Image: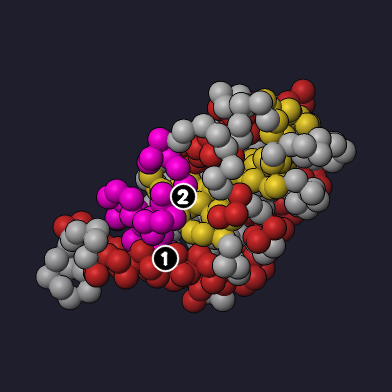
Amino acid sequence: MVHNFNAGPSILPKEVFEEASRSVLDYNGTGLSILEIGHRTPLFQEVMDEARALVKELMNLDDDHEVLFLHGGASTQFMQVPMNLLDDKETAAYTDTGVWSTKAIKEAKLFGKVEVVCSSKESNFTYIPKDFAVPNDAKYLHITTNNTIYGTQWQKIPKTSNSLVADMSSDILSREMDFNSFDLIYAGAQKNVGAAGVNLVVVNKNILGKVKRTIPTILDYRNHIKEGSMLNTPPVFAIYVCMLTLRWLKEQGGVAAIEKRNNEKAALLYQALDENPLFKGTVNKDDRSKMNVCFVMNDPSMEQSFLQFTKEQGIVGIKGHRLVGGFRASLYNALPLESVQVLAELMREFAGQHA
Ligand SMILES: *Cc1c(COP(=O)(O)O)cnc(C)c1O
């Protein structure tokens, strides 16, 4: 039995793997693989339609918000967002809460002025800044809702009169939120939504078409909206896997139900961490992520042996990111509670042997 705590690409529901692999051989009894049908055939159109409809339903989106599945990872959105929303004399406000935020800031500077309104960089991103002001004239405020590498998460989305843009790559659809209050949301699919190779973008169509620059056809969101996310050949298999994962999420009871389970998983692991004399969390408790739990050992020389110990019991993917060290256990939607129970128990057992 393997317990997969990988940070991304990461665990998806077993049912999704089963159905996706059946469809590679024979999609819905057609005798054709999902990989060999034209993207403009009714067979694939129904996949695209269902995927977009499920996102709308699960996120409770209004009619102004359009759902797109675009090529490339979240990193493509770092530049596509400012290219579409920010003129070169205008300012955008960015919060700097981790490596991914820093990368988004770097790209935005290519298109306009960037004001970094807060940063936790001085403490290696161990907390979410609370007091900061956003200039009234900022075209938008950008946040990274969950900082995958450091294990912090915005528990409260900042209130702002500015347009709100969010990188939700590692916590999208993991907790309830007023998704309509965002003008643009993007997420690489490979953490909570599906397979790598596609981006989920949710955009309020009313904010588009305001910049003066000429946007290359393939990078202009308006063209993708017009063409129903089929401006060119979309990443068909990645979108198909997203659709299956979204279906699964709906069957689980939707975002509210999965949030309850995610809360349970995170509470269990953080409790095991806090009561264990060998381990300590790496971030401010109030800002702890429910998706990526980061921790180290008080005696770093024991880390290799804990890693080996858990590996022997089927634990996969808990080595921390090189920028933080220690461990990171990612508890995405598809990770079962049982896997968290196993890891928590192994931490207790290890402490019993070594404390
Ligand atoms: C993983 C991740 C990214 C990068 O996604 P790619 O799809 O590899 O470009 C960006 N932002 C956050 C918050 C992430 O977790």
Dot 2: what SS? helix
**Dot 1 amino acid type:** Ala
Helix, strand or loop at disc 1? helix
x%, y% of residue 316? 47, 46
Which region is colored magenta? 216-245
Main structural element of the magenta stretch: helix, strand or loop? helix
Residue in the foreground of this view, choosing between 29 and 62:
62
Q: Nearer the viewer, mark 1 or mark 2?
A: 2
Please check the rendered image and state whether residue 26 is part of the magenta-colored stretch, yes or no. no
| Residue 238 magenta-highlighted | yes
Q: Amino acid at mark 2?
A: Arg
Locate the C terminus by quadrant: top right
Residue 218 - label = none
10 Å crowding of disc 2: few (<14), some (14-19), many (20+)? some
In the image, 266 versus 113, the foreground residue is: 113
Residue furthest out toward the left: 31
> Which residue in the structure is indicated by mark 1?
51
Closer to the camera in the image, 208 or 250: 208
